[in-house]
Image: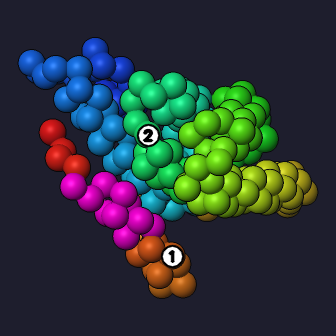
Amino acid sequence: VAFLSAVKMAGSLDAVAGSFDTRQKVSILEQRRCVLLAIVSLTSTNSDSLSEILDKGFLSTVKKWLGDILSKTIGGTDLLLHLLTHISELPVSKSVVMSSGLGKAIGAVEKHKICARTKNEAAIKGRIQKIKGNWNASVKEMRQRGEKSKNESKKRPREQPLVRIKSAKASQETKKILIFQSTCQGMRFV
């Protein structure tokens, strides 16, 4: 419930309370979105909370945010790179991707003027390829896991309430935090 409230607070200019001008509200929304993307991507992929967030339409929200970036309403290349980086490791299912429409939207970014023939084209296309590869692998893994569950009648073990980073993943998690910090460097959080 709290997370959904936070997502709503990052939804539109109307969600920013206070006497800020439009430029300030846009900046606040960029910051909120940056933080939410980082939180979701740093949540353990085995977390029931992450599964619930994805099932409740988080990728549809991310698609809207991507649209805002591409229309130059909220965010720019930095937020786009941050968004692409932080959604690439999400444990998505085919139904979640299909219902959100985010897969097609991401594919269209490569031809958009924010990417095509810009200095960031290689970085953007690289992240898009990573998303495609990771998401295809995630869909395949979930399909196989679903078949195993049916055959073995076993459920995925529930995660403890606190997210714990396994030592094997620690360097990857540290890298994600550093990417988040460098992306949000200089932003003022309100």
Q: What kind of residue is marked 2? A: Gly
Quadrant containing the N terminus is top left
**Image location of residue 183, percent across then percent down:** 36, 57
Task: Residue at 19%, 29% (x, y): give it.
Answer: 24
The span shown in magenta is 176-186
Image-based side of 40 in relation to 29, left or right: right
For residue 94, above or below residue 183? above
Element under disc 1: helix
Q: CA distance from mark 1 to mark 2?
A: 26 Å
Taking the view exactly as shown, the residue that stands out farthest to the bottom is: 167
Say which quarter of the image contains residue 180. Answer: bottom left
Task: Residue at 34%, 38% (x, y): give it.
Answer: 30
**Image location of residue 169, percent across then percent down:** 52, 78
Number of marks in picture: 2
Element under disc 2: loop
Q: Is residue 56 magenta?
A: no
Q: Is residue 5 visible?
A: no
Task: Residue at 77%, 59% (x, y): give it.
Answer: 133
Look at mark 1 in the image and give the residue it sits on: 172
Say which quarter of the image contains residue 3. Answer: top left
Quadrant containing the C terminus is top left
Image-based side of 115 in relation to 153, left or right: left
Magenta stretch mostly in which secondary structure?
Answer: helix
Q: Is residue 129 visible?
A: yes
Question: Which residue occupies the foreground of this view, 129 or 134?
Answer: 129
Mark 2 residue crowding within 10 angstroms, few (<14) / some (14–19) / many (20+): some
Taking the view exactly as shown, the residue that stands out farthest to the left is: 19
Numbered tag placed on residue 4 in the rendering:
none
Look at mark 2 in the image and give the residue it sits on: 76
Q: What kind of residue is marked 1? A: Gln
